[in-house]
């Protein structure tokens, strides 16, 4: 560095110092600056096994949409980035594939994601319908057609209730999930879609042989609110109290600590996907270190937003997620 460059940098520091004052910090961590060199690449980040495949970074691309403008292009771009950085990915609701919709092609991304974990996705209502029609074999065909590693079952009674044309469940989601596990030999993930789950529901799921529980916690995209916004203004007001019911990721991680202790060897779920209100890699790092079992953290809206801005922006977003996570593993300890 030349003397001129050094002088310019010092001047920048003086000018930027006035813009860099902060009054509060992140109290979740101890900052330990003496105990590590700067991490090289992502060597400090633990790999995670999902469905027998290795994720090089514990970041899950949460279920995206299909059957809409640009959805196929976005899914292919997300899958490509997942392959490059060693991430996992859940598809949006795959109902168009079952129905052989013109949008079916949006979901065929295996050749783009390579050998990274890829999960199809169906809702409880669609599964109830398949069982009622005696078409449960469609599940295996869906996994085969998409070359997916398993199935995400999304549980969304609040969303369906708020949706003007929403479905009504004929039995408890837990009964339907158990029926899938009884006849299905591929890995299964169960997720909520924005309200999260309370301790009794989480404990029931933790005792099942699931590949993962995906929080879908309160604090991210609120699909109940989204559906309510499609109603008349008066109807929105009548139903709006239900939009605020749910559990945050922090609440659910605290619940999981207790459930793991209570169940002991009866805790059968292999992984947790922490999603819903996870704003950045430090939020993810916090939960990964708090949870008593293997975990990854998931983003949906941030990935979608970056994908809409283009491939280079998306790639940079993932690079910064991983490098920031590596710094956290090097210098931060969760309190």
Image (tube, rainbow, N blue to C red):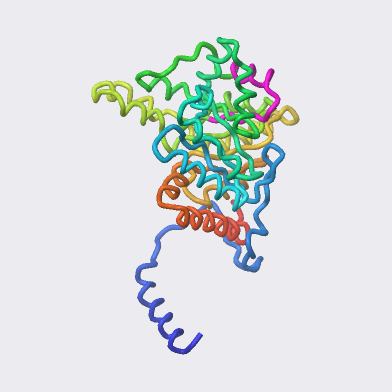
Residue depicted at x 38% and y 25%: 242
Is 179 magenta? The answer is: yes
Is 117 magenta? The answer is: no
Q: Looking at the image, is 225 positioned above or below residue 280?
A: above
On screen, residue 8 versus residue 48, left or right, reads left
- The part of the image, by quadrant, that contains residue 38 is bottom right
Q: Looking at the image, is 43 positioned above or below residue 225?
A: below
Measured as percent of width and height from the top left, residue 211 is found at 66, 33
- The part of the image, by quadrant, that contains residue 52 is top right
Q: How many marks?
A: 0
On screen, residue 196 versus residue 37, left or right, reads left
Viewer-side residue, 4 vs 248 = 4
Measured as percent of width and height from the top left, residue 267 is found at 70, 30
Viewer-side residue, 68 vs 301 = 68
Single out the residue that lies furthest toward the bottom.
Answer: 3
- The part of the image, by quadrant, that contains residue 178 is top right
Numbered range of the magenta stretch = 175-191
Residue depicted at x 56% and y 26%: 153
Single out the residue that lies furthest toward the right.
Answer: 265
């Amino acid at each position: 560095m030349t003397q001129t460059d050094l002088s310019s940098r010092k001047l920048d520091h003086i000018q930027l110092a006035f813009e860099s004052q902060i009054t509060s910090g992140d109290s979740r961590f101890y900052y330990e600056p003496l105990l590590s060199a700067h991490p090289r690449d992502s060597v400090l980040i633990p790999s995670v096994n999902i469905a027998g495949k290795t994720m090089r970074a514990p970041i899950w691309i949460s279920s995206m949409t299909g059957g809409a403008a640009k959805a196929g292009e976005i899914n292919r771009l997300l899958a490509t980035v997942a392959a490059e950085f060693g991430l996992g990915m859940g598809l949006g609701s795959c109902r168009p594939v079952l129905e052989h919709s013109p949008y079916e092609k949006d979901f065929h991304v295996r050749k783009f994601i390579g050998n990274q974990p890829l999960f199809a996705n169906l809702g409880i209502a669609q599964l109830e319908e398949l069982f009622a029609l005696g078409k449960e074999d469609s599940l295996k065909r869906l996994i085969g057609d998409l070359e997916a590693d398993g199935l995400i079952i999304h549980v969304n009674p609040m969303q369906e209730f708020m949706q003007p044309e929403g479905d009504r469940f004929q039995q408890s989601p837990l009964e339907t999930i158990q029926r899938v596990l009884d006849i299905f030999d591929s890995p299964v993930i169960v997720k909520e879609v924005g309200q999260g789950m309370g301790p009794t529901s989480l404990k029931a799921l933790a005792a099942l042989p699931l590949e993962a529980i995906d929080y879908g916690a309160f604090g991210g995209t609120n699909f109940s609110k989204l559906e309510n916004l499609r109603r008349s203004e008066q109807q929105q007001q009548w139903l709006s109290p239900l939009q605020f019911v749910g559990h945050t990721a922090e609440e659910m991680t605290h619940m999981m600590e207790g459930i793991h202790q209570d169940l002991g060897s009866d805790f059968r779920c292999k992984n947790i996907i922490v999603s819903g209100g996870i704003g950045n890699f430090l939020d993810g790092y916090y939960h990964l270190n708090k949870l008593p079992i293997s975990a990854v953290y998931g983003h949906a809206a941030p990935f979608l937003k970056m994908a809409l801005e283009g491939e280079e922006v998306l790639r940079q977003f993932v690079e910064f997620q991983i490098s920031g996570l590596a710094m956290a593993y090097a210098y931060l300890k969760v309190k």
